[in-house]
Image (cartoon, grey):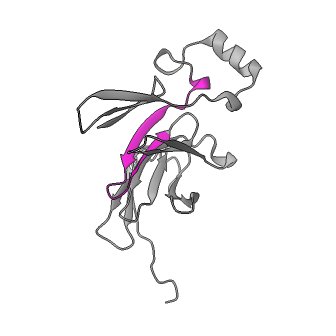
Amino acid sequence: VWVALIGADRIGFVSGRDHKYSDMSLPPLAEESSPKDRAIGERLGGGWAGFTTLYMHGPRRMWADPNGNFMYVGEYWTSRLLRIDVNTHEMKEYKLPPEYRFAYLYDIAVDKNHMAWISFANADQFAKFDPYTEKFTFYQLPTRDSNARNIRVDNSTDPPTIILPYTGANKIARVQFRTNTAR
């Protein structure tokens, strides 16, 4: 069992072997804010649930690759993707391109091909992270103000179908990718 502790900037887990709880701290975000920004943050205090978001990742929703060794975590406040090796607990972060800095990475689903699919709360797009190339591909949604805070994968199709409910627009997107564009 894995859990994102958004206000504490930690990832918790229960061992399947001995059923004991442990957690891991996310690395500090020293490069993300200037000394002046830090001073302002300290003076203002507070933030989400009484924590200062200026210095934090904000781990939100996560999804494990059911056929692999990785757990993916959305870092809401930094719009980064965190990948955790479930065996070694080694963490690696992937920054989104600068134009997605305020996209608010929200939810993740992993398909049968090990691709991590990502929804955003503030971008009217979704993305695919390819763990083999460690690159993101972004896809525009057809509706504005979608606030697509969830994403699911239908692995019964080939390639997998992506499903995104639009919280902001009261719609659901079903995205099917073409396999042969030569026709």
- Residue 60, given in percent of the width and then of the height, sits at 44, 36
Query: Which residue is painted at 52% across and 31% down in the image?
Result: 26
What count of labels does the image hold?
0
In this orientation, which residue lies closer to the viewer: 165 or 152? 152
Write down the region rendered in magenta. 53-74
Q: Is 3 on the left-hand or right-hand side of 148?
A: left
Q: Is 82 on the left-hand or right-hand side of 5?
A: right
Query: Which residue is painted at 23% across and 32% down in the image?
Result: 19
In this orientation, which residue lies closer to the viewer: 55 or 12? 12
Q: Is residue 157 magenta?
A: no
- Residue 183, given in percent of the width and then of the height, sits at 49, 90
In the displayed structure, 46 sits above or below 152; it is above
In the rendered image, the quadrant that contains the N terminus is: top left
Query: Which residue is painted at 25% across and 39% down in the image?
Result: 16
In the displayed structure, 77 sits above or below 114; it is above
- Residue 65, given in percent of the width and then of the height, sits at 37, 54
Quick check: can you spot residue 62? yes
Query: Which residue is painted at 37% across and 47% down in the image?
Result: 63
Quick check: can you spot residue 121? no
Quarter of the image for residue 54 reads top right
- Residue 5, given in percent of the width and then of the height, sits at 41, 28
